[in-house]
Amino acid sequence: MTASAPPPDPASTDARPGPARRLFGRSLAARLLRVILGCYLVVAVAVTGAQVAMEYRSAHRRLEADVRAMERTFGEGLADALWNFNKGVLRGILRGVDEMPVVTGVEVRDEHGGLLESVGGSEDGQRWPSLFDRPFERRFDLVYYDENRRPHRVGHWIVRSNDGIALDQVKETLIVILINSLLKTLALLAIFSIVVHRMVGRPLAEIAGFVTQLDIRTLGDRPLQLRSRGNHELHLLAGVFNLMTARLRRAFDDNAVLLRDLQEANATLQARVEERTRDLERLAVTDPLTGLGNRRALDEALAKAVREEGAGLSLILADIDHFKAINDRHGHAVGDAVLVALAAALGAEARAGDRLGRWGGEEFVILCPATGLAEAQGLAEAMRRRVAETELPGVGQRTCSFGVAERIAGESADGLLARADAALYAAKHNGRDRVETADADPAFDRRSAA
């Protein structure tokens, strides 16, 4: 008889019963019950066997004692009948002996060993297996004592018996022992089934059902509580399990907080990186002294304007006059301050769509989209007057020369710059503090085109 696993509690039934079923299929309670009953059966068989052996041994000793007692009971009568050659009496005594349950046969022989009388020898009453069917015999001398009490040996007689008779005598006792052992085994099986199921099987099934429900969302929502009474190791295991789940829940919560902090820190860091990247990108195209676009920014803006503006594009180059003398006489700090002031003066006259930047050194570029040559020349003249009227720090009023060029159809950015630079050179050559324009040359070299 084996113990079946208890049905799972409906409250703890999981939508995925596979792991629980596999666990119940290897029920510890059933295995424990099998081990206990196996050990008990071994002990019960050994004890029952010992009881049977002891009962059989006791019956065998009684059988031998009964056989030996016949010498005192019948020996004298047999000796007297044999001395007097009274076969009727001899036969009567032997039949009486043969009627005794412990005797299977009896015979009398004279002093020379000759058979005088024999009774019995049939063992039809024996019903036990041949394992216990071991015949044996006992020989007793027949001695006749005359009136002077002198012994005369007249022969001997032999009593035959069988060990199976001893077993037959305790047969009912052995049956009672076997039935008692069987009843105790069945009773203990039922008791063990109930006790093991209640104390081990059911709590383990509750633990298994609880475990199958656990996941990251439900961990620690409710504690594991065993319905069985007592305070044994499984209750201790449930307490330790609840403590473990609580710690795991706190660890998961701490990890969630840490992850959220890391995400916020990462977002902040990413924002700072993006801000720093924008700053670096801005610095890459910005002149650090004046805050205007640098040569790189101007190159990109000019290339884009050449691609998009067509012929309606003018370029102004501005260069402060005698700037080297300012640096030599007043130092580079004053020279830097002059450049900053000059950039502010040029920016004051620049229009909304114009692009002002520092080309390098004391040179500035004004990119004028959708602007003809005459309009660009007027803008350069206004800037020249503004610079001449501005008090520059440390040096007072100074002048600036300008070169203006309008892009010719098909002309490259380098070609436009070259003509504007040529016009600026002409302004320097013709006395400075003036605006010169680069006229369209009919003989324009097409090798400078994009």
Image (cartoon, rainbow, N blue to C red):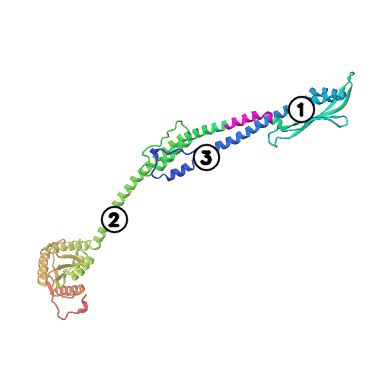
**Kind of residue at badge 1:** Asp
Q: CA distance from mark 2 to mark 3?
A: 64 Å
Does any portion of residue 295 appear in the rendered image?
Answer: yes
**Kind of residue at badge 2:** Val
Q: State the image quarter where residue 362 is shown.
A: bottom left
Q: Residue furthest top?
A: 147
- Residue that mark 3 sits on: 31
Please check the rendered image and state whether residue 435 is part of the magenta-colored stretch, yes or no. no
Q: CA distance from mark 1 to mark 2?
A: 121 Å
Q: Start and end of the magenta stretch?
A: 168-182
Q: Residues within 10 Å of mark 3 (few under 14, many from 20)?
A: few
Q: Is residue 230 above or below residue 379?
A: above
Q: Residues within 10 Å of mark 1 (few under 14, many from 20)?
A: many
In terms of secondary structure, where does tag 3 sit? helix
Q: Look at discs 2 and 3 and give the one toward the viewer.
A: 3
Does any portion of residue 68 appear in the rendered image?
Answer: no
Q: Residues within 10 Å of mark 2 (few under 14, many from 20)?
A: few
Task: Tell which circle, 3 or 1, labels the residue nearer the N-terminal end.
Answer: 3
In terms of secondary structure, where does tag 1 sit? helix
- Residue that mark 1 sits on: 98
Could you say which disc has been placed on residue 273 in the image? 2
Task: Tell which circle, 1 or 2, labels the residue nearer the N-terminal end.
Answer: 1
Image location (x, y in percent) of residue 207: 43, 39
In terms of secondary structure, where does tag 2 sit? helix
Closer to the camera, 25 or 412? 25
Q: CA distance from mark 3 to mark 1?
A: 58 Å
Q: State the image quarter where residue 37 is shown.
A: top right
Task: Tell which circle, 2 or 3, labels the residue nearer the N-terminal end.
Answer: 3
**Kind of residue at badge 3:** Arg
Image location (x, y in percent) of residue 6: 45, 38
Please check the rendered image and state whether residue 179 is part of the magenta-colored stretch, yes or no. yes
